[in-house]
């Protein structure tokens, strides 16, 4: 875990906890109020990979969004860069899936969910989505998330979610993705 993420863990609980309610269309994050206190950036360097990248929070036309860029490399058993947020309260129990407002460089990206059952660092649930140059809404039902291994449940439970990440993953490519909103529906 990088030092940036550790440093802001306490602040995360203070700012995030009041935002959780029922799913309806729960906006988990709109990046307007100190997103750097809730989001951490990681690369495959934590396990010996050589992918490089960065995440920043950009103001544009009165809105703020997360901007993740980098070079994803599968060399040395690597292959990811990620921006991730912890979810100490899980998701609303009636949530059916993840909702994003995104744009980017016409590539496929992924949402990774970790749950109370994903105990090992390489365990997660994954669902892909495509981006274009224009902002668009993406709805990913929990039933679309695939477990990274056979020892995990087939479908993640909303109440057991522990973190959510947007990930450039699995192939050599240049990543460039913007996230304006992320939440549950």
Image (cartoon, helix red, strand yellow):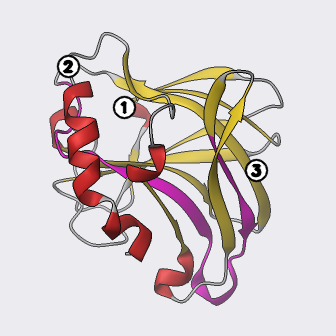
Vertical order, 129 against 107 (above or below): above
Tell me, for residue 176, which label it has, or none: 3
| Side of 59 relative to 99 (left or right) | right
Q: Is residue 77 magenta?
A: yes
Q: Classify mark 3: helix, strand or loop.
A: strand
Q: For mark 2, what is the residue?
A: 21
Q: Earlier in the sequence, mark 3 or mark 1?
A: 1
Q: Which residues are magenta?
A: 66-92
**Residue found 62% across the figure and 56% down from its top:** 55
Location of the C terminus (image quadrant): top left
Location of the N terminus (image quadrant): bottom left
In percent of width and height, residue 171 lies at 71, 65
Disc 2 or disc 1, which is closer to the eye? 2
**Residue found 82% across the figure and 43% down from its top:** 105
**Residue found 16% across the figure and 35% down from its top:** 159
In percent of width and height, residue 134 lies at 80, 24
């Amino acid at each position: 875990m990088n030092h940036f993420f550790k440093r802001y863990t306490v602040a995360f609980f203070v700012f995030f906890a009041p935002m959780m309610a029922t799913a309806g269309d729960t906006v988990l994050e709109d990046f307007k109020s100190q997103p750097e206190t809730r989001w951490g950036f990681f690369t495959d360097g934590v396990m010996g990979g050589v992918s490089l990248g960065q995440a920043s929070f950009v103001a544009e036309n009165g809105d703020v969004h997360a901007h993740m860029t980098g070079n994803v490399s599968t060399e040395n058993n690597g292959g990811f860069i990620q921006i991730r947020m912890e979810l100490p309260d899980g998701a609303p129990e009636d949530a059916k899936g993840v909702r994003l407002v995104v744009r980017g460089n016409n590539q496929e990206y992924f949402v990774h969910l970790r749950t109370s059952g994903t105990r090992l660092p390489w365990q997660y649930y994954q669902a892909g989505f495509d981006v274009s140059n224009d902002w668009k809404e993406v709805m990913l039902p929990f039933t679309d998330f695939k477990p990274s291994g056979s020892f995990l449940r087939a479908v993640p439970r909303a109440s057991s979610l522990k973190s959510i990440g947007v990930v450039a993953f699995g192939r050599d490519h240049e990543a460039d993705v913007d996230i304006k909103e992320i939440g549950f529906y």
